[in-house]
Image (spheres, grey):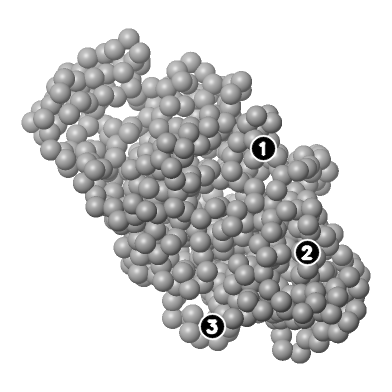
C-alpha cells in the first residue's frame, strides 16, 4: 500500500512500523510519501516528524490504543453491508432522535444501541442523530473533544461497531445523522499542529486558536475536513452530518468553508444516488446558512433553531436566567412557530445588541427544533431535564407544541418517556492538571447562579457518567408509560394528518391571549389549542364543526366556536368531519 501524510513544514518524516522506520520522500506540495509497502489490514503504524515519537496519523482510520497510541490500517471493503437498496427518507419529513452512545444503553456501545432500535421504530422515529463518535481521550465523554476525527471511538466498538450500528439502523428503516466537530479539537491527543498549519492565532474561538480555514496552507486544511465529511458518508454509509457550532468556524474566504462542504456533499449525493444532507448548528440566526447557493447562501439543508427551545422552555418553566431573560411571553412562542427566529434583527437584552435576520421565504423543513437536547440539559449544573422542571401536564404540552410544529422536530434520548435520569457533563481526562482545571471551571461556571461549588457534580467523577445512563425499566412504569404513549400518538398524527406534516410557514397562524395564557396554532384544517391558565373556554371561531383528534386530559369538551380546556392542557382539533383524519386513528 502507499503511505502519505501532509507535513509541509517538516524537515524529515519517517513511517514507523513494527519492523522499524522507513524514510519518506517530500513532494513539492508538502505531502510526504513512501514507496509501496506490502502490509495487511490491521497493521499498526505511526509517523515520526523531525525526530518526534511516533505520532498517530492525522487521517487515522482506527485508534485501538487511544488518542496517544499508534494508528491502524483498515480495509473498508471487508465489511459485509446489507443496505444496498437503502434510501433514507427526506429530512423534511423526519422526526429526529438525538442519541449519546455511551449513555443510551446499559452496554454503552454501538452494539448496545442496536439492541434498542426497535423502541425507536415503535416510537415513530425516522432519523437517529448520533452525538460525536470520533476518537477522544479517556473512557467516557460527550464526544466534542475528539482528536482523531477519522476513527470511531474504540471503547464504543470502533470501526466495525459503528458500521454495524449504521447497517442495523438502515435495516430498521432508520436514517443516521452523525454529529461532527470541525470548529476545534480536544485538548488531549491533538497532534495536528506538529504536522502542519491546521490552526491559526489570527482568529480566536472559545477553545483557543481557530482552525486555519483562510490563511497560508488552508487549502489542505479545508481538504482535510471536507474529506473527513465525505469519508463518514461513504465508508460508513452515514446519511447526514450535523456540524457543531458553525459560527465558530472563522473564514474570511470568498467561498466559505461551509459552502464548499455543502457543495461537495451534494455532489456526492448525486454520484451515489442516495440522499445525503448537512445540518448546521448556528448561533447567528442567519438564514443565509440554509439559503441556496445560487441565491447567495451556503446551501446547507437545515439548521438548528434554538429560539424555539428558548421560547417554549421559558414559558413552561418560568425560568428567566441567562439567555432565557429574552423570552417568557406567549408572543415569543407564536413568533417561533411562524417566523422560526424570534430574534430576527431584534434587540436582545441578554446579548446587549440587535440579533439575527428575518428568515423570509425559508421553508420550515430547513429548521430543526427541540425542547430538549444535549446542550440545553447538559449545560445545566445538575443536568436536569424538563422532567425535573415541569409537571407531567406541561411535559405533554411541550411535546405537542414540538411535534405539531412546522419544522423538523427532534427528541433527546429518554425525553419520550420523561426520563428521570439527568444528563450531566462528564469527562475522563488523563492529564491531572487538565482534569483539575475542568472540574474547577465547572464549579466557577455555576457560582453566579447560586450553586454551592461542592454541590456542582464533578465532570471527572465516574458517577456523573453513571447517573446519566438511561433507566429503561422506567418505560413500563407510570407516569413514564403514559408519556411514551403520548409521544407515539403525536408522531402518528404528524405522519397521518396532512396538515401536521406540512412545513409551509405561510400555512401557519397563531392566536394568543397573554393575560389569559392561552394559545391556538392553526395548521390548515387543524388547530392546536393550549391553555396555560385556569380552566377556560378558548375561542375556535375559525374552526368548523370541530372534532377532537387528541387531547392531553380526558375532560376536554369541544363545541362549535370553542373548546373547554383545563389548565396546563393541550388539544388537537380538526375542522369538519374526520374524513382523512379518521385514518390517523386507525
In the image, residue 415 above or below residue 341: below
Furthest residue in direction bottom, as rendered: 555
| Residue placed most toward the observer, 291 or 139 | 291
Residue appearing at x 43%, y 27% in the figure: 223
Horizontal side, residue 42 vs residue 355: left or right: left
Residue appearing at x 62%, y 70% in the figure: 496
Q: Position of residue 430 (x, y in %)?
A: 34, 48
Instruction: Answer few, some or many: residues within 10 Å of disc 3's Cα (few below 14, many 20 plus, some between 14 and 19).
Output: some
Instruction: Answer whether labels 1 and 2 touch (C-beta < 8 Å).
Output: no
Furthest residue in direction left, as rendered: 19
Using the rendered image of the protein, determine whether residue 222 is visible from the camera's viewpoint.
yes
Q: Position of residue 109 (x, y in %)?
A: 33, 61
Which numbered marker is on residue 291?
1
Q: Quadrant of the N terminus?
A: top left
Which numbered marker is on residue 348?
none
Q: What residue would you read off at disc 3?
A: 481
Residue appearing at x 64%, y 40% in the figure: 290
Q: Earlier in the sequence, mark 1 or mark 2?
A: 1
Helix, strand or loop at disc 1? loop
Instruction: Answer few, some or many: residues within 10 Å of disc 1's Cα (few below 14, many 20 plus, some between 14 and 19).
Output: many
Instruction: Answer whether labels 3 and 1 touch (C-beta < 8 Å).
Output: no
Using the rendered image of the protein, determine whether residue 188 is visible from the camera's viewpoint.
no
Nearest to the eye among marks 1 and 2: give it. Answer: 2
Q: What residue would you read off at disc 2?
A: 524
Instruction: Measure the alpha-carbon separation of dots 2 and 3.
Output: 31 Å
Horizontal side, residue 70 vs residue 524: left or right: left
Instruction: Measure the alpha-carbon separation of dots 3 and 1.
Output: 41 Å
In the image, residue 513 above or below residue 430: below
Q: Earlier in the sequence, mark 3 or mark 1?
A: 1
Q: Position of residue 582 (x, y in %)?
A: 66, 79
Residue appearing at x 51%, y 65% in the figure: 125
Helix, strand or loop at disc 3? helix
Amino acid at each position: 500500500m502507499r503511505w502519505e501524510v501532509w507535513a509541509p513544514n517538516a524537515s524529515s518524516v519517517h513511517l514507523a512500523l513494527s519492523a522499524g522506520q522507513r524514510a519518506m520522500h517530500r513532494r513539492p506540495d508538502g505531502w510526504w510519501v513512501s514507496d509501496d509497502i506490502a502490509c495487511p489490514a490491521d497493521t499498526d503504524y505511526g509517523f515520526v516528524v523531525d525526530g518526534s515519537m511516533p505520532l498517530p496519523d492525522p487521517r487515522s482510520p482506527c485508534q485501538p490504543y487511544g488518542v496517544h497510541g499508534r494508528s491502524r490500517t483498515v480495509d473498508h471493503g471487508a465489511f459485509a453491508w446489507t443496505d444496498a437498496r437503502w434510501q433514507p427518507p427526506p429530512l423534511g419529513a423526519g422526526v429526529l432522535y438525538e442519541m449519546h452512545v455511551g449513555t443510551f444503553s446499559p452496554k454503552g456501545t454501538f452494539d448496545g444501541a442496536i439492541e434498542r432500535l426497535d423502541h425507536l421504530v415503535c416510537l415513530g422515529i425516522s432519523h437517529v442523530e448520533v452525538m460525536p463518535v470520533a476518537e477522544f481521550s479517556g473512557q467516557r465523554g460527550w464526544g466534542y473533544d475528539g482528536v482523531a476525527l477519522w476513527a470511531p471511538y474504540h471503547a464504543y466498538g470502533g470501526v466495525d461497531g459503528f458500521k454495524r450500528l449504521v447497517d442495523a439502523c438502515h435495516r430498521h428503516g432508520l436514517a443516521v445523522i452523525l454529529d461532527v466537530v470541525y470548529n476545534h479539537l480536544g485538548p488531549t491527543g491533538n497532534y495536528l499542529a506538529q504536522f502542519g498549519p491546521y490552526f491559526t492565532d489570527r482568529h480566536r474561538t472559545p477553545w483557543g486558536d481557530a482552525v486555519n480555514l483562510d490563511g497560508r496552507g488552508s487549502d489542505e486544511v479545508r481538504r482535510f475536513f471536507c474529506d473527513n465529511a465525505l469519508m463518514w458518508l461513504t465508508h460508513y454509509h452515514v446519511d447526514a452530518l450535523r456540524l457543531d457550532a458553525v459560527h465558530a468556524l472563522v473564514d474570511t474566504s470568498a467561498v466559505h468553508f461551509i459552502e464548499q462542504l455543502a457543495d461537495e456533499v451534494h455532489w456526492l449525493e448525486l454520484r451515489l444516488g442516495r440522499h445525503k444532507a448537512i445540518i448546521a448548528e448556528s448561533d447567528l440566526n442567519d438564514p443565509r446558512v440554509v439559503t441556496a447557493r445560487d441565491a447567495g447562501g451556503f446551501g446547507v439543508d437545515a439548521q438548528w433553531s434554538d429560539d424555539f427551545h428558548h421560547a417554549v422552555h421559558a414559558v413552561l418553566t418560568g425560568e428567566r436566567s441567562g439567555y432565557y431573560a429574552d423570552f417568557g411571553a406567549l408572543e415569543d412562542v407564536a413568533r417561533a412557530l411562524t417566523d422560526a427566529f424570534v430574534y430576527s434583527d431584534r434587540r436582545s437584552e441578554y446579548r446587549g445588541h440587535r440579533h439575527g435576520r428575518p428568515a423570509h421565504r425559508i421553508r420550515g423543513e430547513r429548521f430543526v427544533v427541540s425542547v430538549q437536547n444535549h446542550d440545553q440539559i447538559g449545560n445545566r449544573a445538575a443536568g436536569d431535564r424538563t422532567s425535573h422542571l415541569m409537571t407531567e401536564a406541561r411535559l405533554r404540552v411541550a411535546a405537542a407544541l414540538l411535534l405539531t410544529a412546522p419544522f423538523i422536530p427532534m427528541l433527546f434520548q429518554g425525553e419520550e418517556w420523561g426520563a428521570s435520569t439527568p444528563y450531566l457533563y462528564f469527562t475522563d481526562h488523563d492529564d491531572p492538571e487538565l482534569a483539575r482545571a475542568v472540574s474547577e471551571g465547572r464549579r466557577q461556571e455555576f457560582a453566579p447562579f447560586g450553586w454551592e461549588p461542592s454541590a456542582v457534580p464533578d465532570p471527572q467523577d465516574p458517577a456523573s457518567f453513571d447517573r446519566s445512563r438511561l433507566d429503561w425499566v422506567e418505560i413500563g412504569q407510570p407516569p413514564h408509560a403514559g408519556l411514551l404513549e403520548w409521544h407515539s400518538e403525536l408522531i402518528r398524527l404528524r405522519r397521518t394528518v396532512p396538515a401536521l406534516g406540512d412545513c409551509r410557514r405561510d400555512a401557519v397562524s397563531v392566536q394568543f391571549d397573554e393575560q389569559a395564557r392561552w394559545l391556538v396554532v392553526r395548521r390548515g384544517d387543524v388547530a392546536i389549542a393550549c391553555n396555560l391558565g385556569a380552566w377556560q373556554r378558548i375561542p375556535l371561531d375559525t374552526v368548523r364543526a370541530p372534532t377532537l383528534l387528541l387531547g392531553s386530559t380526558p375532560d376536554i369538551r369541544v363545541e362549535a366556536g370553542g373548546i373547554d380546556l383545563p389548565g396546563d392542557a393541550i388539544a388537537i382539533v380538526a375542522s369538519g368531519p374526520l374524513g382523512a383524519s379518521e385514518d390517523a386513528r386507525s
